[in-house]
Image (cartoon, grey):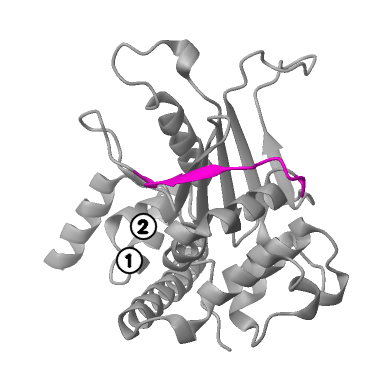
Amino acid sequence: MIFINPKTGYAFKKIFGSPQSKNILISFLNGLVYEGNSTIEYLEIIKPNLPPQLEGLKDTYLDVKARLNDGTLVIIQIQVLNVQFSGKRVLFNAAKTYAFQLERRQAYRDLKPVIALTLTDFDMFPGQNQLISRFVYREKSEGWYYPDNGMELVFVELPKFTKELNELETLTDKWIYFMKYARSLSSIPENMDDIPELNQAFEIANQAGLTLEELEELERREMFIYDQQGAIALGLQQGRQQGREEGREEAKRETARNLLGQLNDETIAQATGLSLEEIATLREERSSD
């Protein structure tokens, strides 16, 4: 067997966001958000994209969005590129989902909690050893919880998961192992086949069940991600080298110049912290050279 890479957004949506994926997503969320407890009994998978509703508001796209049996909204994102402001993007998506629940004339009491689950293929919090981190509103000096904790941010940093196959014990362990290693497996591991939802996930992820068009789309997206990772790493390396001799802002511009021929303006802006206007100016300067 050859399995698709669940860390790409296209594959993740196919495995966890398809009409037949409800039980899979319930098990996945119980494992990653609720520490393996059978907290979720039912959910509804809904369209994950959040079109802007106000002029000038930045568009956003989420991998999977679901409404739990108690009305809680869960938004799930996979981040494979370690670009600047990743944390702000997560917070923006959560706040946007929370605020846009209300239709006209609805009251604040109708607002439901939002859980933003983010899986990263890089260390989101360098220097911290926690595999799963959870953030909510708390009083700064004494630590007591805000009475209406409407948003919770949950991060799973895949590089910090170091268990081997024979060490998997919990539902949480097995789902994280699936996310991190499914692409490199050639069969369903014996110690994971006791969970029906994981077996279903492996069946959907089996390339043999995909159409030629789906396989081509997956390959394009994987190659795009690999190219971006390589381009960003190279650009940052060259920018750091340049930055030893020049100021910080010029180092950012030099990094951006190194990426102009490989990435689009938005991705370069995320990787460097420069504005889209500054990137456009650099492109104009390059074209006039």
Q: Residue at x 31, y 11 (%)?
A: 105
Residue 215, percent from left and from top: 38, 82
Q: Nearer the viewer, residue 124 or 15?
A: 15
Q: Which mark is residue 267?
A: 2
Magenta residues (range): 35-49
Say if residue 256 shows up in the picture: yes
Q: Amino acid at mark 1?
A: Leu
User: Can you give x and y, in whole percent of width and height, for residue 220 in the image?
Assistant: 35, 78
> In the drawing, does residue 71 fall left or right of residue 106?
right
Q: Position of residue 237 (x, y in %)?
A: 51, 68
Horizontally, residue 150 falls left or right of residue 276, namely right
Q: Secondary structure at mark 2?
A: helix
Residue 202 magenta: no
Name which residue type carries label 2: Thr
Q: Image quarter for residue 123?
A: bottom right
- Tell me, yes or no, if residue 159 can be seen here: no
